[in-house]
Amino acid sequence: MDSTETIDQSGILFVCHECDALQRVPAVEPGHDAECVRCGLRLFRNPKGSIDKPLALIIASIILFLIANTYPIMTLTIAGVKLTGTITDTAWVFVQQGSPEIAAIVWLPSVLFPGLTIAGLFYVLFSIRFQMNWPHTRTILAWITHLLPWGMMDVFLLGILVALVKLVALADVLLGTGFYAFLILIFLYAATIASLEPHTLWESLNVRADEQGAFENG
Amino acid sequence: MLELMSRVRLKMANEIVSAKDLGIAGCHTCGLAVNMQNHDHVECPRCGSEVHFRKPDSINRAWAFLIAAFIMYIPANTQPMMRTTSLGSESADTIMSGVIYFLSHGDWHLALVIFAASVMLPLLKIIAIAYILISIQRGSTQQKQEKTNLYRIAEILGKWSMLDIFVVGLMVMLVQLGRLTTIDPGPACIAFALVVILTMFAEEALDPKLIWDQTE
């Protein structure tokens, strides 16, 4: 019995992960947040709606992720010659030019890391929602937590827009299906993250602590 | 255990108390409050990660990443980001020449975005983390809230420095003009990415709880 967590009328025991203040967070109404009493960090959020909402959003994200990465982001026409490609093509050009390290810098934060995060979240959410008890959900959720800051789709989108302005001087530029899918994906992805509370997800996966039983409030 | 809980209640009724003072640590991965039971580190019962009171060797690791990031910041801004070869003539663009290009074309908002994201942001992030580290080492008890806010801002904004690398990546791919023009990535790309990655590691290594550990 090494978990000091108790859920009862006086709330859940929280340690602020930025200032270490120990506090009880009382029950939070749906759509409201609880902030740290000392440093103001958001400790807990009770999103409106059930787990169906992030699950639906993540399924939509998967579809848009696939579209965004199979259709060209833009098409250039220079002197009658059409040039087009997906994000992965961008990286592949670098590999062919003999600089795989630059390919990695572009491709990992814009495609692989967000892709793994989306796939992993789907796995965890689906497993919780339909009580599948799929293996390794805790490991995957831990990985997603550490992977999240390395996904940079939003920065990449701004990069597309800056490149667009630079290229307009050189060629006729037409934004492709991939670009629009990417734009919608960023909003869906942000909405998915906003509709999740990590603490609640962890509690749903917390089989071991259930076996041990939370200790009583003295 | 019951005794611990009553200690928690008693303490919390009067003042804000750090979890560490009561032998409790928050898991860095899942956030669970874990009773450390006189151990230095334990396995989190909820997510299986290793739980520490404070991130191990936080100050030293943060400094190491930060100094490496600062060294990389120099080639990132002086070496070319991309080389454009057009009809036999070659030109190399650094970050600043890209900013000047936009300024000369009247796109001052874009010039500002690139300058802020590529030149100012990494430098400000390095200075911010260095400031927090120095103040922890000097045992400063002042402006804890401001330093925590600074840490948060650095954490949120850091990734936007990747902007110019993505721009170069897209340019290189899209401008395959065959015999007329080629664009190649320059050495600054790698240096730049390393600045972003190393500052993210530094910020990850730095434990903001150390700011609040300093008492009068």
Image (tube, rainbow, N blue to C red):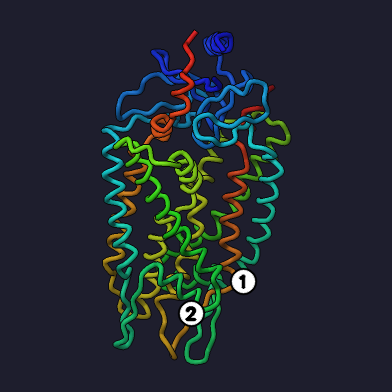
Q: Residue at x 38, y 65 (%)?
A: A160
Indicate the secondary structure of the residue bearing disc 2: strand
Q: Quadrant of the C terminus of chain B?
A: top right
Q: Mark 1 points at which residue?
A: B79
- Camera-side residue: B131 or B159? B159
Q: Name the residue under label 2.
A: B183
Callouts 1 and 2 in the same chain: yes
Q: Position of residue A78 (x, y in %)?
A: 33, 84
Q: Quadrant of residue B16?
A: top right
Q: At which x and y percent is residue B130?
A: 66, 45
Residue occupying image coordinates x 35% and y 46%: A122
Q: Specify whether residue B14 is in view.
A: no
The residue that appears at 50% across and 81% down in the rendered structure is B84
**Image spot of residue A195 (x, y percent):** 33, 38
Q: Residues within 10 Å of mark 2 (few under 14, many from 20)?
A: many
Circle 1 packing at 10 Å, graded few (<14), some (14-19), many (20+), is some
Instruction: Indicate left or right for A53 with B123 as reference.
Output: left
